[in-house]
Each structure stands twice: as structure tokens, then as C-alpha cells.
Image (tube, helix red, strand yellow):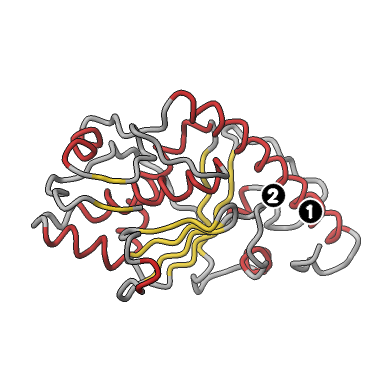
Amino acid sequence: MKASSDFGFKAQCSGHSNVRVLSPVAALCLLAFSPSCIFARPTPTLTVRVFNYAQVSVRTLSSAEREADHILSAAGRQVIWLDCLGKAQDLQSRVLCEMGWSPELPALRLLSGQVTKQFRGLEFGFATVPVLATIHYENIVSRSLRDNSPSEESTLLGCVIAHELGHLFLEKDTHSLVGIMQSHWGRDQIQQAQTSNLRFTPEQVVRLRERVERLADLQQEMFARMIETASAGKTPTANE
């Protein structure tokens, strides 16, 4: 994802309140690994693992996740953000976090430091489809400081997260001329964000819903296998 040099407006993607959930396993009844739990939830969910190597503050990251979740709500699912580097992890969350990169459990990786030459043209981030979205957090901070708008940071981060996860969920080259999946973000794109118009296109929404629904079904099947393993008296592992 590239950024235009005229990125000078305060980015806003219409934030909505949302609770950062540190243990999506609990939300999916894996907290106790009990075979008697009920999978039905008022709002269908999709789990995304978060590896915050950049040590983004809880406040900033939570705000960014709310922005991203609102944009991704076009898929009809609420995103459950699993903090894989948090200190207060239960056993079940740790099992999920220690699984390797896989399409069934997409991951978000936030990195600090300068972008290497290989990724210099991808200022804010890139996606390794279909398993991993990488965000260059330091470049987002630098952009907000250059724009003299510190409050822009979390909003821009949320938009970039939604963009890169969009690549994972749509599963192929999905840059478009309009909407959240544009490859270059400049004045027009930020103005669209300010008016809550930086979103997936109608065509992308159709594909997004299909792909995310299939992904959510795969996650449910995986969680069910883990519950079955635990109910048999075994310790769930990443290979189950």
C-alpha cells in the first residue's frame, strides 16, 4: 500500500464503540473447552490474531481496531482481535497464537523500524495472501506527525489495517480505483474517510461476505475439533 505525498488531511473513518476482546476463544466457548457450550452468538464473529511487535499503546491500537472493525463490518461479521503478545493469556488463547501462519487464522503483524529496501514502495503495509497482514507502524506515526495531527494516528492505522486485511479476505490482487482498497491515498481519499465514504465497493462487499463467511465456518470447525479433543481428556494442541 502506497501513500501519496499530499496526505495532509486529518484521516477519520467514522469510529464506533467496540470492546477489544483479548480472548476470542472465550467468546467462542473455548474458554472452558466444554462440550456443553453453545456456539450461537447474537453477532457472528471472525477471529484475527494480533502480533503487536511495535508495542503500539493499548489505547491507540484499540481505537484503530474499532475503525477497522467498522469498515470490515461490510462482511457481516464482528472481528475478534486476539492479542497474541499480551501477558494475561489463557491456555486456549496461547494455543491459537502458537499455531503457524494459516488461512484459517489470519494474522495482523505490527512492526516498528525503517522499511527495508524490498518494501520501500509499500509505505504503510503489505499483505501475504491469505495468511498475514503486515503494518509499518512507524511510518504511520511519522505521517501523522508530518501532518501535525497526532490524533490522525489511530484513525489512519485503522484504515490501513482494514485495507491489508481486505487483501487477505478477498484473496487476490484487489486494489481498486475507488474505496478502501485504493493503492494510493491522497487528498481525495482522506476526504472520503472524513465523510465515512472510504469503504469497500459493492462488488467487493459481495466477495468479502462470501469469503469471510467461508473463513468463519472453517474457524468454527477448528474450534469444534479443539473442544472435542479437550472433552476426550486430551490437551488441545496447535496440531488439532
Which is more N-terminal, label 1 or label 2?
Answer: 2
In this view, 61 is above or below 206: below
Mark 1 residue type:
Ser
Image spot of residue 112 (x, y percent): 34, 73
Quadrant, the C terminus: bottom right
Image spot of residue 171 (x, y percent): 57, 44
In this view, 167 is above or below 230: above
Quadrant of the image occupied by residue 233: bottom right
- Measuring 35% from the left and 63% from the top, which residue is drawn there? 58
Q: Specify whether 107 is left or right of 215.
A: left
Image spot of residue 191 (x, y percent): 18, 35
Spatial distance from mark 2 to mark 1, Cα to Cα?
7 Å
Q: Which of 114 and 42 is in front in this view?
A: 114
Q: Nearer the viewer, residue 21 or 113?
A: 113
Mark 2 residue type:
Cys
Q: Residue 7, labelled with which disc?
A: none
Is mark 2 in CB contact (under 8 Å) with mark 1?
yes
Q: Specify whether 25 is left or right of 221.
A: left
- Residue under numbered circle 1: 34
- Measuring 41% from the left and 46% from the top, which residue is drawn there? 162
Q: Residue 29, labelled with which disc?
A: 2
- Measuring 8% from the left and 57% from the top, which residue is drawn there? 148
Q: Specify whether 148 is left or right of 197.
A: left
Image spot of residue 159 (x, y percent): 34, 46
